[in-house]
Amino acid sequence: MTMTTELLISLTILTPVLAVPGILLFGNKQNLREAVSLIAAAVLTWLSLNLFQQLQAGTVLAAQWWELLPGLTIAFHIEPLGMMFALIASSLWFVTVVYAIGYMRGHNEQNQTRFYAYFAVAIAAVMGVALAENLFTLFVFYEVLSLCTYPLVTHAGTDKAKHGGRVYLGILLSTSIAFFLPAMIITWMQSGTLSFTPGGVFADGTSVVLLSVLLLLFAFGVGKAALMPFHRWLPSAMVAPTPVSALLHAVAVVKAGVFTVLKVVVFIFGIDAVQSLPVTQWLIYLACASILLASLVAMRQDNIKARLAYSTISQLGYITLGAFLASANGVLGSALHIAMHAAGKITLFFCAGAIYVAAHKTLVSELDGLGRKMPYTFAAFTIAALSIIGLPPTGGTWSKWTLMLGAVDSDQLFVLAVLALSSLLNIVYLLELPARAFLRSAPASESDHHHGGEAPWPSLLALCVTALSCIVLFFTAGPIMQFLQGISLT
């Protein structure tokens, strides 16, 4: 029996939630509990691939759940950008569950059942964001994502974890309430719709001042995009277990932010309108500042996860920058960087967690000589770092190249210098880790101490798979870009 498109979309969003009762039921039987998570992730990936195939075949994929008011609905519609985000989140959920099995057991984490349950709900929220037909639906799932990831951030239950959770939730909710929600309401009052529309929803002749204010409200209201100065939540969230940092705070949560910015620019304003607004130039400067300042801060961080957190803030700046460049190549480069950065950064966080579990080290300065004991982990780290830097043969090469083309198209030539300088800074703060691990000798006090080699095999397998994906993306960028060309920019 063939599923209707409405049922297929609904199952894609609800499958992670349907897994929660099974996770809770087998809370005391870890093998069965984790099997439920793996099966749900596999089913979700299959459903996403099914949607992708139907979208490629030209099928209109839409579903409506609930009409709150006339014209204000919880509804879903799938276009290439959202489809790509859904594929990334679903496939990486499966890989992250495999990684988490090794990490959570290897580190003897408490409350593992709660961890897997909230993790599943968070993935459901991400799928809702990815497939949303309108801004209201996206906003609802965006806020659910903030709330259901709070227990994951505070998982350890320590005072430090609770403080990090307060900063995390405080910034995300306050930016939503103060900026995002008013922007959405004004948009609805002005245009009469919140549906994502090719070319934007505002009529010709709409006040430039009003559009400028709205663009600023959206830019700062989408706190998950971590645009400075509303970025502190991301380093604070690094108190979470590494699987949380890896998927939710290096891929799903932050990508929900930049994905939202990209959707708003393309489908609420339209790139022609954004390009014509005077405030856009100021936002380009701000994105460039975020890229460079976060890189400089990252260089000063000795804690591995803190360094990677500031690196993420910098890389998110690339995506918002591409959106504000408001050119076809700029938007394409942003969309491409969502995928390329996801593969690279999740690998880096996986490696950081593997180092912690296997060698009990959290600082860059402690890594001297460790590459001899953990060669696969540091080889994977090197590959992922090259992708973040933007060097072949890794996927990050193409997204940065396309962003540079977007800068040229928009006559923002200074952006080329910003991107080049940023890549040089990436080299300094990322390649220092494998350089220390492979090229330096272990301290004399540890020369005879055996750390037990690599992390547990599930974690090692996961990080090797994601590292390999960085290389695969280099050779498959062409079809991905061709698929994303379907994002309407007119």
Image: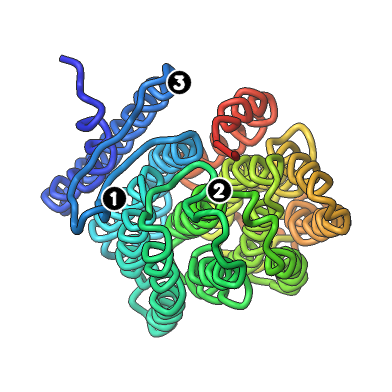
The answer to whether the residues at label 2 and label 1 have Cβ atoms under 8 Å apart is no
**Which percent across, then down, holds residue 99?**
44, 45
Quote the CA–CA distance across marks 2 and 3: 21 Å
In the rendered structure, which disc, 2 or 1, sits on the residue that comes first in sequence?
1
In the rendered structure, which disc, 2 or 3, sits on the residue that comes first in sequence?
3
Specify the label residue 266 is tagged with: 2
In the picture of the structure, the residue carrying the numbered disc 1 is: 120
Name the quadrant containing residue 380. top right
| Label 3, residues with CA under 10 Å away: few <14, some 14-19, many ≥20 | few
Helix, strand or loop under label 2? helix
Mark 2 is on which residue type? Answer: Val
Vertical placement of residue 340 versus 217, above or below: above
Mark 1 is on which residue type? Answer: Ala
**Which percent across, then down, holds residue 217?**
52, 72
In the picture of the structure, the residue carrying the numbered disc 3 is: 56
Quote the CA–CA distance across marks 3 and 1: 27 Å
Q: Residue at x 61, y 38 (%)?
A: 467
Residue 383 left/right relative to 101 = right
| Label 2, residues with CA under 10 Å away: few <14, some 14-19, many ≥20 | many
Helix, strand or loop under label 3? helix
Quote the CA–CA distance across marks 2 and 1: 29 Å
